[in-house]
Image (cartoon, rainbow, N blue to C red):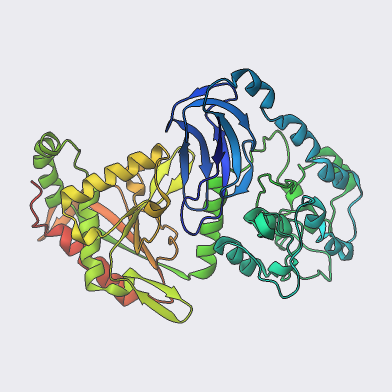
């Protein structure tokens, strides 16, 4: 019996996913709930288990392809007798990769068009779209995800002009990115004069065509073509560059495409810096009392609860105290409305070998040191093994990042939207300090607060920091 493998819906607001890696190949035996392939969505990376035991008969969607949810991405022969035919059913990604760059090669071979001729290239996504895609009719509702609508708003794109290749004409993330990469942004303006070195250039070659470098220079250092927009394939967002692309490619170099997660991180960081006016405050905390308490209790804590005691739960509890005292820091901004969250959900930045993710400790104000520590360890472990659920990286109201674990004195982190502030923790180290006109050796730590000045003023930020400082320096809560 053939069992379809479908792209799962990893959350209510997620409508598509990218297959980053198949863990099995056609002909391999699989057990029910055994990890079968890895996906990347706008919210989380995850391993998807097999829906049935049997033999992987066919892979319908290859690695790097983005498809809507409920799309059949493969087939399992539950009876296990399809192993022989499975090898022949494997996809042939090589021909697809060979044919996909054809438009790019043609574009590269042609001489650079003059600046006014660059804009007619906008209809390119329509030509690249598959035959099954239907353009949106006038007056018809445009089906798209919140992410697609956000990208369209940021780039000034009318979604009615974007051909949808998803089910029922849905405009997918791939469609909008391809449209933007092809120069379809409405907010883009024509250049009246040749750009200078101070001008900002975007990644697509069509933008830099208005000021081509000398032919000899182009021939000596030919930059790679911008990634083509192929139907069903992974599309790279065109991020801005501060210099012409030709000035980046010189000498010996290697080009590595950004991973899906790296692209999402880049998009979120750019959006945060563009939307929120960042202001930073730095303070210094005497962690001697907490460090002494932890040193005395950590062995018994681990023996009794079978988990290690770190400094992070102490910082979380101190942040909770500050957020209770100053609820504006625990808010979000919707237009001209400030949303004061009643729950305190702390997002914790976790560094991964392939990027960064921010799982959330829900209702942190209701947990003690042990509860926070266990929650932290569980989220961090599952983040590194790609087993987080989408809801576990959503609904944070405040965030904490810890550059100090890598030896940093302090950092000035970017706010994780839709939060209005993020706390950065520096390294805890012993330093000489002056106490009552005497020099003493104390365990000191720099902390920083990045905050959105549209909502949080400097006075509130420093009062919040003072509460965090006072809580840690005068710690009274028992650990065991």
In which quadrant will I find the N terminus? top right
Residue placed at 76% from the left, 42% from the top?
A: 224
Q: Which of 50 and 191 is in front in this view?
A: 50
Q: Nearer the viewer, residue 246 or 171?
A: 171
Describe residue 96's horizontal placement relative to residue 314 as left or right.
right
User: Which quarter of the figure has residue 196?
Assistant: bottom right
Residue 394 at x, y percent in the picture: 40, 57
Residue 207 at x, y percent in the picture: 78, 58
- The outermost residue toward the front is 1
Label count reads 0
Residue placed at 72% from the left, 69% from the top?
A: 160
Residue 62 against residue 427 in the figure, above or below: above
Residue 355 at x, y percent in the picture: 48, 43
Residue 44 in view in this figure: yes
Residue placed at 71% from the left, 53% from the top?
A: 203
Describe residue 351's horizontal placement relative to residue 138 as left or right.
left
Residue 97 against residue 346 in the figure, above or below: above
Q: Which of 218 and 42 is in front in this view?
A: 42
Residue 416 against residue 86 in the figure, above or below: below
Residue 206 at x, y percent in the picture: 81, 56
- The outermost residue toward the top is 84
């Amino acid at each position: 019996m053939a069992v379809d493998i479908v792209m799962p819906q990893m959350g209510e607001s997620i409508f598509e996913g990218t297959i980053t890696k198949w863990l099995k190949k056609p002909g391999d035996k699989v057990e029910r709930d055994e990890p079968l392939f890895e996906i990347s969505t706008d919210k989380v990376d995850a391993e998807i288990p097999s829906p049935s035991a049997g033999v992987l008969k066919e892979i319908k969607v290859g690695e790097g392809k983005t498809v809507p949810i409920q799309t059949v991405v493969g087939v399992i022969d539950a009876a296990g007798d399809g192993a022989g035919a499975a090898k022949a059913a494997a996809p042939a990604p090589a021909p697809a990769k060979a044919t996909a760059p054809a438009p790019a090669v043609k574009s590269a071979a042609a001489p650079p068009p003059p600046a006014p001729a660059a804009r007619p290239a906008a209809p390119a996504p329509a030509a690249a779209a598959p035959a099954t895609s239907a353009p949106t009719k006038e007056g018809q509702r445009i089906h798209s995800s919140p992410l697609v609508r956000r990208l369209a708003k940021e780039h000034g794109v009318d979604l009615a002009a974007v051909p949808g290749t998803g089910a029922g004409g849905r405009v997918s993330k791939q469609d909008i990115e391809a449209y933007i990469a092809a120069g379809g942004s409405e907010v883009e303006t024509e250049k009246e004069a040749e750009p200078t070195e101070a001008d900002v250039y975007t990644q697509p070659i069509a933008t830099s065509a208005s000021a081509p470098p000398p032919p000899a220079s182009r021939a000596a250092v030919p930059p790679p073509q911008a990634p083509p927009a192929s139907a069903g394939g992974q599309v790279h967002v065109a991020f801005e560059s501060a210099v012409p692309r030709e000035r980046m490619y010189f000498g010996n170099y290697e080009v590595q495409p950004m991973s899906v997660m790296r692209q999402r991180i880049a998009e979120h960081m750019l959006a945060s810096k563009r939307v929120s006016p960042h202001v930073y405050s730095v303070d210094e905390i005497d962690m001697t009392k907490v460090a002494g308490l932890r040193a005395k209790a950590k062995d018994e804590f681990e023996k009794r609860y079978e988990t290690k005691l770190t400094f992070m739960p102490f910082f979380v509890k101190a942040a909770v105290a500050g957020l209770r005292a100053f609820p504006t820091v625990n808010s979000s901004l919707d237009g001209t409305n400030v949303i004061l969250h009643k729950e305190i959900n702390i997002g914790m930045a976790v560094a991964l070998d392939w990027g960064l993710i921010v799982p959330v400790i829900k209702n942190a104000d209701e947990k003690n040191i042990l509860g926070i520590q266990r929650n932290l360890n569980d989220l961090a472990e599952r983040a590194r093994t790609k087993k987080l659920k989408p809801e576990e990286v959503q609904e944070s109201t405040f965030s904490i990042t810890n550059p100090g674990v890598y030896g940093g004195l302090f950092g000035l982190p970017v706010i994780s939207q839709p939060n209005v502030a993020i706390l950065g923790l520096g390294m805890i180290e012993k330093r000489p300090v002056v106490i009552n006109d005497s020099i003493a050796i104390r365990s000191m730590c720099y902390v920083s607060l990045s905050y959105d000045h549209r909502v949080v003023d400097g006075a509130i930020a420093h009062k919040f920091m003072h509460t965090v400082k006072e809580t840690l320096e005068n710690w009274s809560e028992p650990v065991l």
